[in-house]
Image (spheres, rainbow, N blue to C red):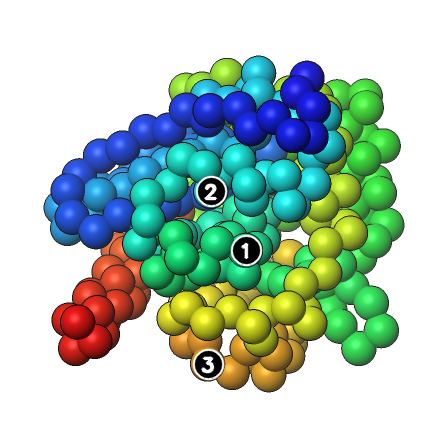
Amino acid sequence: MLDDNTIAPLNSLTEGTGKALVLLHGWGMNSAVFTEFLPLLTAELRVIRICLPGFGQNAVSVPDNYSLATLTDWVASVIPDGAVVAGWSLGGLVAQQLALDYANKVAGVITLASSPCFVSGPGWRGIEPQVLQGFQTQLARNYEKTLDRFLAIQAMGSPSAKQDVKVIRGHLRDLPAPAEQALVAGLNLLEQTDLRQAIGRITQPTLRLYGRLDSLVPTCSIDRIHELQPAADTVVLSRAAHAPFISHPQQTAEIMLSFVKNLDKIDRRCS
């Protein structure tokens, strides 16, 4: 356990050459979930995979104050200047906060099946609060069963749902199991974080990629998110659910690479 003012050096995995792309995973996961997706990016980019504090390679590095601000500070300390940051689900919250707090380090933002606010509320669709509360209760009894249920919900609706879950589940075992505190605190972040009023202040080019069949970030919230950040590019994959880089890796990679290449063109015009 580390106090609020201590930033532990996070481990990361780097492959490929070129412009830096940082990949951040979702709740209960680790950076190994990107293993099969990686080769589609590394031919053109230097991809840096970072396990969030308390997960995978960084399972033993758990901040005492497990907040979005703390996670953002820790990740910011190990990413290179001028990186594009891509966050999946919970990782998307960190990517958005990085863009807000570390504008000088982040050249672009990609969110994969993510939202500025994951929980349903008045005039907003997302995950029902009782669903997350149920995960909290179940987590105290059995992490494995909780994770299996969460994976099933993530893949729900995808034509390749069973295969998607199998792929994710298999790669999770490549790295250490998460710390219990990080699992509990991560669910709290999904339940309590609300960046809706902040994302309009993101100045970096932003790509928001969704799956139309996603039950955690429902399609009816996509237009609302776009209203809050109209400058962002929005792409919806019609047959994908919550893990488009697993179910539709080639299509997802092409969209991400096109976004990064356009950033390079903008950089050259401005230099």
- Residue at (21, 76) in percent of width and height: 270
Cα–Cα gap, marks 3 and 2 = 24 Å
Query: Which residue is tagged 1?
Result: 101
Residue 268, position as x, y percentages in the image: 15, 71
Tell me the amino acid under the disc marked 1: Asp
- Determine whether label 2 and label 1 are within 8 Å by CB: yes
| Residue 4 position (above or below residue 151) | above
| Residue 8 position (above or below residue 200) | above
Tell me the amino acid under the disc marked 3: Ala
Q: Mark 3 or mark 1: which is in front?
A: 1
Query: Which residue is tagged 3?
Result: 231
Quadrant where the N terminus sits is top right
Label whose residue precedes the other's in the sequence (2 or 1) = 2
Crowd rating for badge 3 (residues with CA inside 10 Å; few <14, some 14–19, many 20+): some
Residue 32, position as x, y percentages in the image: 40, 30
Q: Is residue 150 visible?
A: no
Cα–Cα gap, marks 3 and 1 = 18 Å
| Residue 147 position (above or below residue 164) | above
